[in-house]
Image (cartoon, helix red, strand yellow):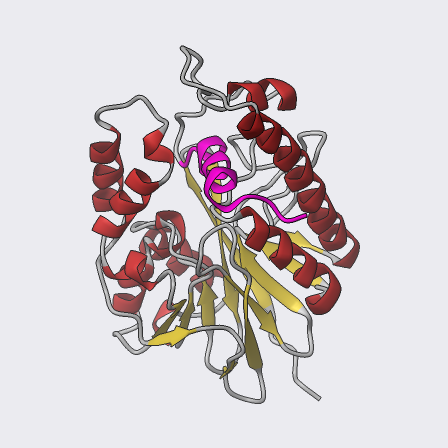
Amino acid sequence: MTPDAPVHPLVSPWGRFGLYSFFVDAPEPAIVDTGIATSPAEGMAPALEAIGRRIEDVRWILLTHGHIDHVGGAHALWELTGRRAQVVIHEADAPMLRSRRAHVDEYRAGRGQYLRDPGGAAKVEAAANAVISGEMEPTLLVKGGETLSLGGGVTVSVHHVPGHTPGSVAYVLDGQRAVFVGDAVQAHGAANGFPGYTDPPAYRAALKRLRDEIRPCHLYLGHPYRRDDGTPYGVHLDEAQAADAIDQSLDAEGRVAEAACRCLEAGSTRTDSPYSPFAQAATELGYTGDPSLEPAPFFTSMHGYRTRGRDA
């Protein structure tokens, strides 16, 4: 029987968001996601000390995907472990750990096409420089399907759940069905009030896999994502709450897909609307948020439907 490993949430603020990282108290301790550059020293180290653990003893840094608020603290955390921890990321998102420039390139290729901000790329570059503690080569690249040993019989299986990013993964504590998904379960969005994903068909398929195959008993999200009534989910979801969050994510994606596809079929053109050229979709969905606030999930998802289509 696989022994249980306690999980301790490590929560730190960042602007309008709460950043969730997790300490897995195994013989070879792991931290899932690393927040931003200041998170390891200012948030994680004191939190671990409070429960009688040391950040120097962390031996695994498991990254769910490559966005700056998840990999930003990776280099700093790795340094605090004496460079002994193994840093794990999916091969598709590894460029975002290796290079700050990859975050600017992602912006230009996607949401930056729609935001009327001549200085937008410069702002993303400044943010990457400020909150990414260092560029680095990962220790271990994964594709999905791997099993990682955290010692003492504690193992973690890696599942590729693309959609939010090409290299999003879920880490599953075997025997506990404790699942760390980062931003792969968006529900109705976080502080921006809109779910964000680059590949809608892949996102929907990943949600179905989580629901039908992985079936979490414990689900750990990357941010306080919100239900359809606007209330946030907590940092740790039990089995019923996890099923609800996945179902609400599927429902939200279905609504967004229908509105996006009708908008694209109508052949929307540029207007003065801040949601242009997807103003029809924003109106249909009742979305009135600021689409320019990073990470700009409205345009990220709309661009996904424009380039990837939708899953029937």
Question: Looking at the image, which is closer to me, 274 or 154?
Answer: 274
Question: Looking at the image, which is closer to me, 281 or 173?
Answer: 281
**Considering only vertical position in the picture, is 42 above or below 97?**
above
Q: Is residue 58 visible?
A: no
Q: Is residue 290 visible?
A: yes
Residue at image location 25% in from the left, 67% down from the top = 79
Quarter of the image with the N terminus is bottom right
The location of residue 15, given as percent across then percent down, is 40, 34
The location of residue 49, given as percent across then percent down, is 43, 63
Question: Looking at the image, which is closer to me, 190 or 271?
Answer: 271
Residue at image location 59% in from the left, 44% down from the top = 310
- Whether residue 130 sits left or right of residue 231 in the image: it is left
**Considering only vertical position in the picture, is 49 above or below 120?**
below
**Considering only vertical position in the picture, is 307 above or below 182?**
above
Count of labels shown?
A: 0
Question: Looking at the image, which is closer to me, 82 or 36?
Answer: 36
Residue at image location 74% in from the left, 64% down from the top = 212
Instruction: Determine if the magenta segment contains residue 157.
Output: no
Residue at image location 56% in from the left, 82% down from the top = 155
Instruction: Determine if the magenta segment contains residue 310.
Output: yes
Q: Residue furthest top?
A: 272
The location of residue 125, given as percent across then percent down, is 22, 40
The location of residue 78, given as percent across then percent down, is 29, 68
Magenta span: predominant SS is: helix
Span shown in magenta:
295-312
- Whether residue 3 sits left or right of residue 247 in the image: it is left
**Considering only vertical position in the picture, is 8 above or below 268?**
below
Q: Residue furthest right?
A: 240
